[in-house]
Image: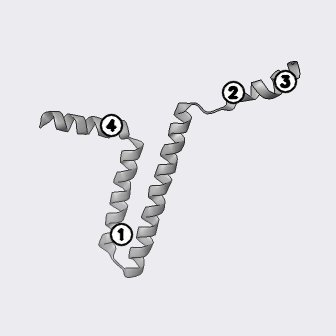
């Protein structure tokens, strides 16, 4: 039983907790937004639309900020709604 404990049960300490899964999800969402922005920038670069390139970068940055700081943004929205 001692060998079973050392090989099977002791290796379970490396399992992710809920915070690790949440950070993984935020990382994947941020990477997806980055890929979409890169695609849009490449598409608009071929057409030489500088304003659209800047717009895609600004919108992608805003979406990434909202994803990474959801608690802060939701507090801002709650405060805005309570002021109205």
Q: Nearer the viewer, mark 4 or mark 3?
A: 3
Q: Position of residue 79 (x, y in %)?
A: 21, 34
* Closer to us: 55 or 17: 17
Give the percent coordinates (x, y) of residue 24: 54, 42
Q: Is residue 1 above or below residue 24?
A: above
Q: Say above or below: 56 vs 8.
A: below
Q: Nearer the viewer, mark 1 or mark 3?
A: 3
Query: Which residue is most to the left?
Result: 84
The residue beneath circle 2 is 13
Labelled disc at residue 77: none
Task: Give the residue displayed 76% in from the left and 25% down from the top.
Answer: 10
Q: CA distance from mark 1 to mark 4?
A: 27 Å
- State the SS at label 2: helix
Q: Which mark is residue 53?
A: 1
Q: Residue at x 33, y 58 (%)?
A: 59
Say how the picture is coloured: one colour
**Which tag is nearer the camera, tag 2 or tag 1?**
2
- Dot 4 or dot 3: first in sequence order is 3
Q: Which residue is mark 4?
A: 72
Q: Which residue is mark 3?
A: 4
Which residue occupies the foreground of this view, 53 or 10? 10
Left or right: residue 49 compared with residue 11 = left
Look at discs 2 and 3 and give the one toward the viewer: 3
How much space separates mark 2 and mark 1, taking CA atoms?
46 Å
CB contact under 8 Å: marks 1 and 4:
no
Find the distance from the CA under tag 4 to the CA under tag 3. Answer: 46 Å
Q: CA distance from mark 1 to mark 3?
A: 58 Å
Could you say where residue 28 lies in the image, as x and y percent from the top left? 52, 49
Q: Earlier in the sequence, mark 2 or mark 1?
A: 2
* N-term-proximal mark, 2 vs 3: 3
């Amino acid at each position: 039983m001692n060998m079973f404990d050392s090989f099977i049960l002791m290796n379970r300490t490396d399992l992710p907790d809920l915070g690790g899964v949440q950070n993984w999800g935020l990382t994947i969402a941020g990477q997806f937004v980055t890929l979409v922005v890169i695609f849009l920038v490449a598409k608009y670069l071929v057409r030489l639309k500088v304003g659209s390139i800047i717009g895609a970068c600004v919108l992608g940055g805003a979406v990434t900020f909202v994803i990474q700081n959801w608690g802060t943004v939701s507090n801002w929205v709650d405060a805005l709604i309570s002021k109205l």
